[in-house]
Image: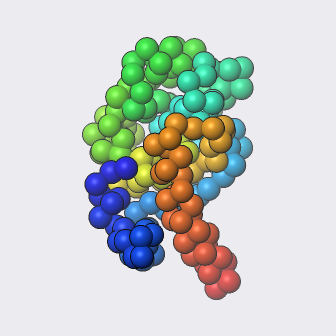
Amino acid sequence: MSNALINYIIIRQGRPVFLGEKLFKVFYPTIEIASAYDIPYEKYFESGKRGIIYDIDNTLVMHGAPADERSIELFKKLKELGFKTVLLSNNKEPRVKSFADDVGSMYLHKAGKPLLKGYKRAMEMMDTDPSSTLFVGDQLFTDVWGANRAGIETVLTSPIDPREEIQIVLKRKLEKIVLKSYHKKNRQKQDL
């Protein structure tokens, strides 16, 4: 867990308590959708998006899985629509490169998400800026937070596989608290 996130938590009677919705907003995605494969990419292209940055593991395939037919077809469709893509992963190069080669995408490995440098470098590679870029990922505290800090519109997907490494399982528990606040905020918006 990042130090910045820890600073947003206080301990009361041995339980973590978050300090408020205003602090949560940095983690809110622009939209939330079940799967990267359900995104209306044509609409995003029509609205001016030209580049998409993707997380790989648990966003496009199960953690550590190779590219499958569905992911290969998605990237083929994106290329036909006119999108450029970059896979942005904190994983090591052999994992990221093999997936990128299979789907035909540019990539950045050991990206250091949620640090800004990876997101900025990905936009440079695609020759896009924050207004013409979309980010798709499954984790709030790395994927979405970093993209939000870079000014990129974000799509949060549900994780493909609920079985995850222990450090991610712990982050997911904190994500549930943030998502509860996000869902409450969105309900209030819809009521207006």
Residue 95, x across and y down, in percent: 47, 18
- From the viewer's perspective, is 103 left or right of 112? right
User: Which is more toward the observer, 94 or 84?
Assistant: 94
**Front in this rendered view, residue 76 or 20:** 20
Please state if 77 lies on the left or on the right of 181 as rendered.
right
Q: Is residue 168 above or below residue 82?
A: below
Q: Nearer the viewer, residue 163 or 106?
A: 163
Q: Is residue 69 left or right of residue 46?
A: right
Does residue 98 appear in the picture of this structure? yes
**Quadrant where the C terminus lies?**
bottom right
Q: Residue at x 34, y 67 (%)?
A: 8
Q: Quadrant of residue 3?
A: bottom left
Is 184 rendered above or below residue 86? below
Q: Is residue 125 visible?
A: no
Q: Which residue lies at the image location 32% right of the left edge and 37% below the top edge?
A: 112
Q: Position of residue 32 (x, y in %)?
A: 62, 56
Quarter-of-image position of residue 65: top right
Relative image position of residue 109 (x, y in whole percent):
38, 26
Q: What colour-coding does the image apply?
A: rainbow
